[in-house]
């Protein structure tokens, strides 16, 4: 792969990951606000399934199967032939459809508007939640101090 | 003579209607929502996800509501639902080194880089009932510190650098999957871990406790315990690359265990590993202790005949759905089985009486 396609892949991974992890009630208001309903045809209608999550022994050793998680996926094609895929955590077909449409539109001229009005605010919201938790965790970090012993 | 019996439909239907009514309880008390269970009984939700072997907090909360709080019944509902899901595939192994830690402690290294972060723990509470919770009231916001970004290194990394901790050889060998093929013994360590992570918390805890009390003692220290979220990545064939498909909360426990060395290995510390869905601390520590006990053969240790060393015993009794299925089925109608047992006992008694009676007659 050329550097150019690597960059394109990295960008797509970033938005698809963001959409997959996004809480439905954070994504949907932003997407609805866009009021975009481009024509499309289903390549694969939304379906709910399970993915077996793997871990590694000791965090770094051989893989093992930990348990499944729910995932909803779908694929669609816009009128201009752009294909979008949605793979999102959970069981919401609405969210999977929005993710696939956004994935498709991000490959078109609409990308700038979608990034500004959906992806960026969404990423900010999710980062704020994450930072708030990290701040609370930081407040529970133990500060050790040594007691001066009374023997001279 | 075999007599087929039918009946009970009406009784069953009415029993289910009454169950629904009892589940709802007193209608003057507000009904529980799924969101309330998910948010306020989150450790129960975590247990149902871990033992139901499906990460989906809303589904686990629904199962708890439907099961009236009977967690094994809720786990049963999740397992049953799980079997209806098409399997999209396997994720890449999650990287717990990149976990966003809510909690991270080490019982072995006070000054671990990244620090001792207690998180929202029950530890150091006095275990006194808090009657303030019986009244409704606002909760004060938790204090905040300077948030740390960046990953928290695993404690095991520091010991490994010194080569005094056994290495876990990295590999990309596809592990066996007990949801696809039945367990066979001896089981590989990946299969043992899959079985333990979905095993009954009480059973795994009891087994782990038995090792601490001396049945195959393995002197475990909690080298590290961490709780937090990790991203889950999967290869998507139609894309040709991997993307994140979500994130899961996990509890990871690494124990550091005494090891005197064997014929082939120098004295060094060995490891037990626990990784469980959700905030499931007790379970992941117990899992690590049992994992370590089950490793006796590969570490060249003696078989002490302890229950926790017997993998077939441990793994074939750890699953509470298999266990409860078999246990509870004996309450269902066994009229025909019992009828034949009854006939047999009556016959044996008649024969015994016949043997005694002639003697009595002679006396």
Image (cartoon, rainbow, N blue to C red):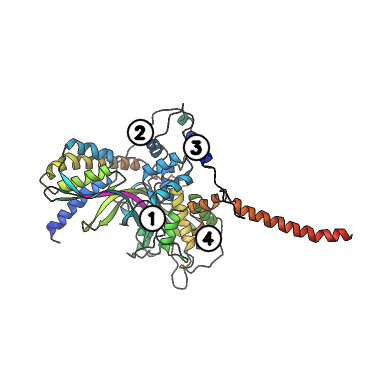
Residue B19: numbered disc: 3
In what element is the residue under mark 3?
Answer: helix
Q: Name the residue tied to disc 2.
A: B141
Quadrant assignment for the C terminus of chain B? bottom right
Query: Does B54 appear in magenta?
Result: no
Given contact means CB atoms under 8 Å apart, are the residues at marks 1 and 2 in contact? no
From where the camera sits, is residue A87 visible?
no
Callouts 2 and 4 in the same chain = yes
Q: What is the chain identity of the residue bearing mark 2?
A: B
Tell me the residue that label 1 is attached to: A66
* Badge 3 and badge 1 in a common chain: no
Q: Are marks 4 and 3 on the same chain?
A: yes
Nearer the camera: disc 1 or disc 2: 1
**Which residues fall within the magenta stretch?**
A68-76
**In this view, the mark in front (3 or 1):** 3
Q: Earlier in the sequence, mark 2 or mark 3?
A: 3
Are callouts 4 and 1 both on one chain?
Answer: no
> Badge 4 local density, few (<14 within 10 Å), some, or many (20+)?
few
Image location (x, y in percent) of residue B83? 39, 52
| Residue B296 relative to residue A143: left or right | right
- Residue B216 visible to an observer of this rendering: yes
Residue drawn at x 19%, y 45% as measured from the top left: A101
Q: Give the residue pinned by disc 4.
A: B313
Whether the residues at callouts 4 and 1 have beta carbons within 8 Å, the answer is no
Q: Nearer the viewer, residue A29 or B152?
A: A29
- Mark 2 neighbour class, 10 Å CA radius: few under 14, some 14 to 19, many 20 or more: few
Q: CA distance from mark 2 to mark 4?
A: 47 Å
Q: Residue at x 33, y 42 (%)?
A: A138
Horizontal and vertical percent position of residue A50: 33, 52
């Amino acid at each position: 792969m050329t550097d150019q396609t690597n960059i394109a892949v990295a960008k797509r991974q970033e938005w698809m990951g963001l959409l997959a992890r996004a809480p439905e009630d954070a994504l949907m208001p932003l997407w609805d606000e866009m009021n975009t309903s481009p024509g499309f045809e289903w390549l694969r209608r939304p379906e709910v399934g399970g993915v077996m999550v793997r871990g590694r022994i000791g965090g770094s050793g051989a893989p093992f199967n930990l348990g499944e998680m729910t995932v909803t996926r779908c694929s669609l094609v816009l009128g201009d032939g752009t294909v979008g895929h949605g793979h999102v955590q959970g069981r919401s077909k609405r969210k999977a459809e929005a993710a696939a449409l956004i994935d498709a539109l991000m490959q078109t001229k609409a990308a700038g508007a979608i990034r500004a009005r959906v992806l960026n605010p969404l990423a900010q919201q999710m980062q704020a939640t994450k930072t708030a938790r990290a701040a609370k965790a930081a407040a529970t970090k133990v500060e050790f101090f040594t007691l001066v012993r009374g023997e001279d | 003579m075999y007599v087929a019996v039918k009946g009970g439909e009406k009784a069953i239907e009415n029993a289910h209607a009454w169950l629904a009514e009892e589940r709802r309880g007193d209608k003057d008390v507000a009904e529980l929502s799924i969101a309330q269970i998910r948010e306020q009984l989150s450790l129960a939700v975590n247990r149902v996800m871990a033992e139901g072997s499906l990460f989906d907090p809303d589904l686990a909360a629904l199962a708890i509501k439907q099961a009236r709080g009977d967690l094994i019944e809720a786990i049963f509902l999740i397992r049953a639902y799980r079997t209806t899901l098409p399997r999209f595939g396997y994720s890449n192994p999650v990287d717990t080194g990149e976990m966003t830690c809510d909690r991270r402690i080490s019982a072995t290294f006070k000054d671990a880089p990244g620090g001792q972060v207690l998180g929202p723990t029950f530890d150091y509470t006095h275990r006194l009932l808090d009657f303030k919770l019986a009244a409704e009231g606002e909760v004060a916001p938790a204090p905040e510190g300077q948030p740390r970004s960046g990953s928290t290194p695993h404690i095991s990394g520091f010991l490994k650098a010194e080569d005094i901790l056994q290495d876990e050889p990295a590999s990309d060998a596809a592990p066996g999957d007990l949801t696809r093929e039945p367990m066979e013994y001896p089981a590989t360590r990946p299969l043992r871990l899959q079985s333990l992570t979905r095993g009954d918390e009480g059973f795994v805890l009891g087994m782990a406790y038995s090792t601490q009390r001396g049945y195959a003692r393995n002197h475990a220290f909690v080298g590290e315990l961490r709780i937090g979220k990790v991203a889950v990545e999967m290869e998507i064939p139609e894309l040709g690359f991997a993307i994140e498909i979500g994130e899961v909360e996990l509890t990871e426990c690494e124990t550091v265990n005494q090891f005197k060395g064997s014929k082939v290995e120098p004295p060094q510390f060995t490891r037990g590993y626990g990784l469980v869905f959700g905030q499931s601390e007790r379970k992941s520590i117990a899992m690590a202790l049992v994992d370590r006990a089950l490793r006796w053969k590969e570490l060249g240790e003696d078989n002490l005949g302890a229950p926790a060393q017997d993998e077939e015993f441990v793994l074939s009794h750890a699953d509470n759905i298999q266990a409860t299925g078999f246990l509870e089925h004996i309450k269902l109608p066994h009229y025909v089985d019992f009828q034949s047992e009854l006939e047999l006992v009556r016959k044996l008694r008649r024969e015994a009486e016949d043997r005694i009676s002639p003697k009595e007659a002679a006396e």
